[in-house]
Amino acid sequence: MENVFFDYKIDLITIKEESKVDFKAFEIHDLKSFFNGKIFVFFQYKSKRNFIILETGIIDYILQFDDLILSIEKGIYKTFTISCDYYSNNFIYEYSNVNNSLIINEGNADLYTISCNYADFKKAYLKFRKRALRELNVLYPDLINNKVFNEHFS
C-alpha cells in the first residue's frame, strides 16, 4: 500500500438527483456545493494505518488541495488567514521544507489532522484528482458543457 491514498464516494441517490441539474452556466464557486460525498484519506507509516473521512463537496476539497499545492510550490509554507470560513470546510496547513513534512488541520472545529510526508501527499492527491475529475465527468455528463469547469480542471 502507498503511504498516502485518497478515495471518494458519492451516494447513488445524490448522483441521481444532481444529474438532473443543468451545470452549463455554473461558476466554480457554484459547483462547490454539488457532488457532495466523502473523501477518504488513508495513511500508512511505520506499520500504523490511519484514515480520515472528509464529508464535503468533492470539488470544494479539490480546489482547496489544489491551492495548498500551488502555495507550497510558490514558497508559502503556512496558511495565511485571519479566520476560517465557518460556512465551508476550510483547512489550515503548515509545511516544513527541512524534512518535507505537511500538517493539515480542519480550520473551524479542529475535527481532523493530516500529518504526512509532502511528496507522498502530493503524489497520491494528484492521482486521486485526475481519477475523481474523470469520474465526475462520467457520473455527470452535463459537466462536459460547463466551460468554466473544463478550463479550470483541464
Image (cartoon, rainbow, N blue to C red):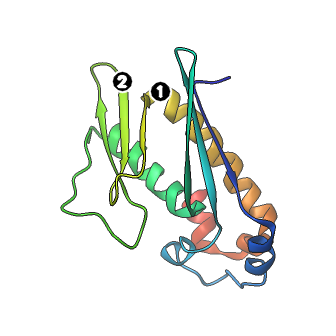
Q: Regarding mark 2 in the picture, which secondary structure is present there? A: loop
Vertical position of residue 47 compared to residue 78: above or below: above
Choose top left, top right, bottom left or bottom right for residue 72.
Answer: top left
Q: Which percent across, then down, holds residue 101?
A: 36, 26
Vertical position of residue 47 compared to residue 29: above or below: above
Return the residue nearer the eye: 2 or 140: 2
The mark nearer the N terminus, 2 or 1, is: 2
Is 78 left or right of 16, judged from the image as shown?
left
Cα–Cα span, label 2 and label 1: 7 Å
Dividing the image into 4 quarters, which one contains the C terminus? bottom right
> Which residue is under mark 1?
119
Q: Which percent across, then down, holds residue 68?
A: 39, 47
> Which residue is under mark 2?
100
Choose top left, top right, bottom left or bottom right for residue 100.
Answer: top left
Q: Residue at x 44, y 29 (%)?
A: 116
Q: Which percent across, then down, holds residue 39?
A: 61, 51
Q: Regarding mark 1 in the picture, which secondary structure is present there? A: helix
Is 61 left or right of 71, judged from the image as shown?
right
Is 12 left or right of 95, judged from the image as shown?
right
Q: Are marks 2 and 1 in contact (CB under 8 Å)?
A: yes
